[in-house]
Amino acid sequence: MIYRIFAALVFIVVIGGTILLGGPQSETTATTVVEEPHDPGYAARDAQLVQTGPDGHPLYTVDADVIRQQPNDDTVQLEHATLGFYDANGALWTARGDEGQVGQDTGRVELSGNVHVDGTPQGTTQPAQITTQRLAFDTNTKIVSTKDPVTLTWSGQEMKSKGMRATLNDGRVQLESSVHGKAVPSRLPGSQK
């Protein structure tokens, strides 16, 4: 009799387990996380960036051995860069530096490391050269500036200063502090003495 009771209990447990385990089961859903794709930016060798104005004419160009876009801080990094830009009279100026960066949508180009700027100031025939270690160019206002020591060579004369601001639209140069040198303005051909 115990055998029958034991067999009946085993039978009830098997049927009860089948009903419990085989009954409707709740579905477990996996949580899906959708991540935005990572923008790796871009890089190029022997590249040229051209910024055009509303009329389609170039405002400035940047040539570089290597450019790298930095998507996280909205800049383009430059290696061995040459910046070409025009003053209000259409005269071409060039600026070279070992490194640089262009701020996207800011109109600001910064050069650093052995920076040289060459061009002919408005109203003169003599070229000028600016040398420094760091320089910024605002393409919207056409202002070149630095807080670093700078040397301005023009018409065979040399002036040194700490800091400079040059407005290319009107040909004005302001040397900020610790100015050393002497400048004697040269006369344009045909001007009165």
Image (cartoon, rainbow, N blue to C red):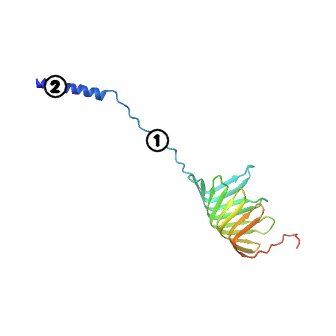
Q: What residue did someone put label 2 on? A: 7
Where residue 121 appears, x then y in whole percent?
A: 77, 65
For the residues labelled 1 and 2, say whether their Cβ atoms are less than 8 Å apart: no
Q: Is residue 78 above or below residue 174?
A: above
Quadrant containing the C terminus is bottom right
From this view, report whether residue 38 is shown above or below residue 8: below
33 lies left or right of 190: left
Instruction: Looking at the image, tell me whether mark 1 or mark 2 is earlier in sequence order.
Output: 2
Of residue 56 and residue 160, the one placed in the foreground of this image is 160
Q: Residue furthest front?
A: 177
Q: Whole-Å distance between the Cαs marked 1 and 2?
A: 51 Å
Q: Which residue is mark 1?
A: 33
Judging depth in this view, the residue of 152 and 148 nearest the camera is: 148
**Quarter of the image where the N terminus is located:** top left
Residue at 81 percent across and 65 percent down: it is 123
Q: Secondary structure at mark 2?
A: helix
> Of the residues shown, which amino acid type is indicated by label 2?
Ala
Helix, strand or loop at mark 1: loop
Image spot of residue 189 (x, y percent): 86, 70
| Count of numbered tags | 2
Q: Residues within 10 Å of mark 2 (few under 14, many from 20)?
A: few
Could you tell me residue 163's position as x and y percent?
A: 67, 68
State which quadrant residue 3 falls in. Answer: top left
